[in-house]
Image: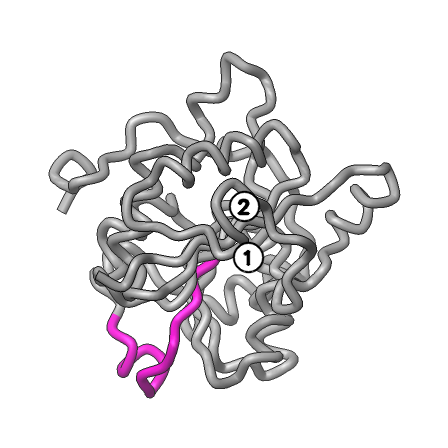
Amino acid sequence: MTSETTPFPRKIKSFVLRAARMTESQKASLEQNWQTYGKTIDQGVLEAEPTFGREADTVLEIGFGMGDSLVDMAIAAPEKDFIGIEVHLPGVGRMLNRVETENVPNIRCYKEDAIEVLNQCIKDESLATLQLFFPDPWHKKRHHKRRIVNAEFAQLVRSKLKPGGTFHMATDWENYAEHMLEVMEAAEGFENTAGQGNFQPGRPEHRPVTKFEKRGQRLGHGVWDLIYKKAMF
């Protein structure tokens, strides 16, 4: 299946592959651990039982960065399975190193375009949670079209969530937070768990504080969380 035949084709990418040097340990981890924990679009639809050896609530995170928060969440919730998507290889290598050294069996990851992964590898109504933490804000107005959160993306997320499943977003850019809120308040089939038009009153306990977030807090940046639940009907 190609992106041209999927109901939510990729037109403008929301990310740019920036040049980034990998450390020797990151390279080694990627080479040694990818076969065990890595997944590719070419492998087709992800099946829970052969992948994780069980059926469990599944959490998918788009853009896990260096992977620390994803690994921390997987360790804190061993009863759940986690799928991470990240295109920047140093982060993938670091995350896989932690997964291996700390023996975290409930994580798998992709290093490909998140939209293509959702379209081609994730079954409809299979996710308990989809997480999007601190995506590229594309803060210049002429780049707003690249923001991953838009009306089309909201409905793609809705199609992949189980009834009652949640879509959790976080950003430290106020303008992007307002954009997310506007998009999701207009999106069919979602309910704002903080009440219509509201952000979460604080950081939800299940979302770890990342080094990136701590740095932003030291600089006086705010953080806005939004959690929407898919309607049960």
Judge whether 217 appears above or below 97 on screen. Answer: above
At 24% across and 53% down in the image, what residue appears? 159
At 16% across and 42% down in the image, what residue appears? 6
Residue located farthest toward the front when viewing the structure as drawn = 195
What's the amino acid at mark 1? Val
Residue 187 on image: x %, y %? 33, 40
Viewed as shown, does residue 125 lie left or right of 229? left
Q: Is residue 57 magenta?
A: yes
Residue position marked by numbered label 2 in the rendering? 88
Judge whether 162 appears above or below 119 on screen. Answer: below
**Callout 1–callout 2 Cβ contact below 8 Å:** yes
Residue 170 on image: x %, y %? 59, 47
Q: Quadrant of the C terminus?
A: bottom left
Residue 126 on image: x %, y %? 28, 67
State the count of labels.
2
Q: Which residues are magenta?
A: 47-61
Using a 10 Å C-alpha cutoff, classify the residue at mark 2 as few (fewer than 14 neighbours), some (14 to 19) or many (20 or more). Answer: many
Residue 141 on image: x %, y %? 54, 14
SS under mark 2: loop
At 47% across and 72% down in the image, what residue appears? 107
Q: Nearer the viewer, residue 51 or 174?
A: 174
What's the amino acid at mark 2? His
At 59% across and 34% down in the image, what residue appears? 19
Using a 10 Å C-alpha cutoff, classify the residue at mark 1 as few (fewer than 14 neighbours), some (14 to 19) or many (20 or more). Answer: many
Please give the label number shown on residue 92: 1
Query: How far apart are labels 1 and 2 at the CA level?
Result: 7 Å
Q: Nearer the viewer, residue 41 or 152?
A: 152
Residue 208 falls in which quadrant of the image? bottom right
Residue located farthest toward the right when viewing the structure as drawn = 218
SS under mark 1: helix
